[in-house]
Amino acid sequence: MRLGAHLSIAKGLPSALDLALKHQCQCLQVFVGNPRSWKTAPLPDEAVEAFRRRRAQLALKTSTRIEPVVAHMPYLPNLASCRRDVYRLSRQALADQLDRCARLGLEYLVVHMGKHEGRSIPQALERMARAIGKVLRAYSGGTMLLLENTAGQGTETGRTMEEIGQLLRRLDDPRVGVCLDTCHLFAAGYDLTEATGLKQLVDEIETSFGCTRVHVLHVNDSKKPCGSRVDRHAHIGEGCIGEAGFRRVLVHPVFRRLPAILETPQDDPGDVDRNLARLRACLRRPRQRAIEPAGRAE
Ligand SMILES: [Zn+2]
Ligand SMILES: [Zn+2]
């Protein structure tokens, strides 16, 4: 499993690669513009070239290769919005982000499933399908679009695998895949700490769109309990999913093959390294069963 984190582009896109290297990341997620604004400064060709050059340099050695590099859409766009101006701006933002990603040679752009704003979920899925379909018809770049599941907070769609599957079926486009977030899954009601919860999730993935359409895993612990529908990321092992939960998820054959990207809080300088070390430990450590005291009642 390739491990990485969402890292800052405050010092420019190429330096995010060096930051990834510093943290011994094998994959990376970034914003490719201002995440909290509709207005984004143009991305100059020189910046694109510098990023591509640095990435190619690092790829010469297996130990420093950063792959995949994933972009995350800004927070304001809502591709399901029923407000006409927001809907139009969201569509434009998606087209602009895809264009940036393609120029930079990124593998994936992650977009959250939209908010229905009080309308019905089927209407929201229909609006999303129209917006994404329109953007993709005019798009010929190599970056894939990944739909990210949500906690189902407020009017968010995409809480269940079934809803994501419905949108994928309407789009019917191999350039669209799925990104799953462990915190969102757990808050949405999939109990990753139990074998039955994980099995239910995998069964739902299989019947809704199939495991091969999942390309990226966001690894975040959850401050809020299972089914709370509240999206609050916690450090690995310090939330309600806990180390035992991550050990279960990360070694599962469906998730093992995916790049795993941290979106945990970054308050202290050591936070990224600590969370990466915990993920590595979860991948390494044998199941708890092996060290249970002997002689327990059969
Ligand atoms: Zn996420
Ligand atoms: Zn989240």
Image (cartoon, grey):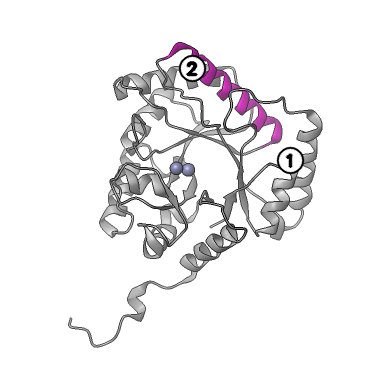
SS state under label 2:
helix
Q: Position of residue 264 (x, y in %)?
A: 51, 51
The answer to whether residue 220 is visible is yes
Q: Are marks 2 and 1 in contact (CB under 8 Å)?
A: no
Q: Residues within 10 Å of mark 1 (few under 14, many from 20)?
A: few
- Rendered position, 138 above or below 10: above
The residue at the point 33 percent across, 46 percent down is 187
- Rendered position, 131 above or below 183: above
Side (left or right) of 201 relative to 138 = left
Q: Main secondary structure of the magenta part?
A: helix
Residue position for label 2: 86
The residue at the point 36 percent across, 40 percent down is 151
What residue occupies the far front of the structure in this picture? 267
- Rendered position, 186 above or below 86: below
Q: Position of residue 186 (x, y in %)?
A: 34, 49
**How far apart in space, not on screen, are marks 2 and 1 (Cα)?**
28 Å
Q: Is mark 2 within 8 Å of ligand 2?
A: no
Examine the structure image and report whether residue 101 is included in the region drawn in magenta.
yes
Amino acid type assigned to the residue bearing label 2 in the image? Val
The residue at the point 30 percent across, 53 percent down is 191
Q: Which residue occupies the foreground of this view, 140 or 58?
A: 58
Q: Which residue occupies the foreground of this view, 86 or 214?
A: 86
* Badge number at residue 22: none
What residue occupies the far top of the structure in this picture? 84
Side (left or right) of 74 relative to 222 = right
* Badge number at residue 12: 1
Side (left or right) of 127 relative to 54 = left
Magenta range is: 83-105
Question: Splitting the image into 4 quarters, where does residue 119 fall?
Answer: top left
Examine the structure image and report whether residue 137 is included in the region drawn in magenta.
no
